[in-house]
Amino acid sequence: MRRGAACGAGMTAGSGTPAPATGWLQLMITVPRGAVDAVCEAMSATGASAATIEDGGDQPVFDTGQEHAVLWDTVRVTGLYPAHTPVDGTVIEIARRSALPATPPYDSQPVPDRDWERAWMGRFRPMRFGAGLWVVPSWHQPPDPQATNIVIDPGLAFGTGTHDTTAMCLEWLARHAPVGLDVIDYGCGSGILAIAAARLGAARVRAVDIDTRAVQVTADNAARNGVADVVQSGAPSLLDGGRGADLVMANILARPLIDLAARITAAVRPGGALLLTGINESQGGDVGRAYVPEFRFERVHRGDWLLLAGRRHA
């Protein structure tokens, strides 16, 4: 039976403020299945550092083989916020951003760091992407020791492979191993895509995020996977004055992808590849147009999410 999963991925507006030393606030909102993606995105935009989803109505739904599908009619979305977050105002803003007809049922409670991290540990298991690429939580043994195994401890950063957008990027990397390439991961979260690129043969990976926690988690995960000499993590200013990369991956949200189009385009060398995701189906046209005429994109679909994969004109 499917019990829960993560939602949200990458660097998002509002995710860069560290929580105070007093801990965290767990905000739980119950919504219809069709509103889950919008609510996850709204939580990211209103300051959530992480989000998970689970059955909101005690509905017994058994696995259908759709690894990343949301199967319940009513879903509880739980966001992790800084302890001082104003709950009522945040819920109203989430409802507005998600176009919900009314304020949804919600609850909140304080959560110490260690309790949240322990709760997340129970939600993740090893996952395979493509042929021979596995993402393995640090508390599990790799199912296939001979495969390319990426050992991830998400900590309090987005990015575990459970979200459709991350899964599409990982599957693309498994099909197009970046051997010898210079790669940029724009909005690195846990570092999962940067580390996958390094483990699949990239010569250099620059992983950037506005969230200082994500930068540190990426560095820790890179060391855990033996690619600290390949993966360099830091703020987006790390890219200033640098040469263009052969491959740029940006798994963030539609609005930042549009706003950052000039900066991201400049980061791709002529003839280089670009992966854009964190995009709902309805947002694909607007995002793609922001990168015209430099790129022509192939669309990859998974659920309601979209990956734009293109190459910059030489």
Image (tube, helix red, strand yellow):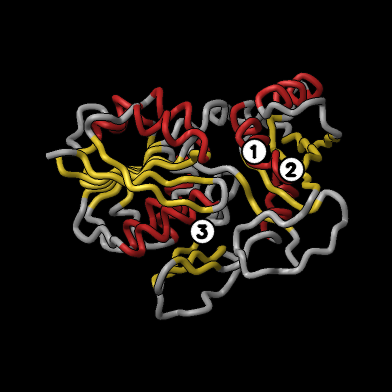
Q: Secondary structure at mark 3?
A: strand
Label placed on residue 40: 1
Image location (x, y in percent) of residue 243: 17, 35
- 104 vs 188, left or right, is right
As drawn, 56 above or below 257: below
Residue depicted at 75% across the width and 49% down the height? 115
Give the residue type that dot 2 points to: Val
Residue at mark 2: 77
Residue depicted at 58% across the width and 42% down the height? 8
Of badges 3 and 2, nearer the viewer stands: 2
- Give the Cα separation between the discs numbered 3 and 2: 23 Å
Q: Residue furthest top?
A: 89
- Give the Cα separation between the discs numbered 2 and 1: 7 Å
Callout 3 environment at 10 Å: few (<14), some (14 to 19), or many (20+)? Answer: many
Image location (x, y in percent) of residue 41: 60, 35
Image location (x, y in percent) of residue 206: 31, 43
Image location (x, y in percent) of residue 93: 71, 21
Label placed on residue 152: 3
Q: Secondary structure at mark 1?
A: helix
Of badges 1 and 3, nearer the viewer stands: 1
- 75 vs 17, left or right, is right
| Sequence-wise first label, 3 or 2 | 2
> Mark 2–mark 1 contact, CB under 8 Å?
yes
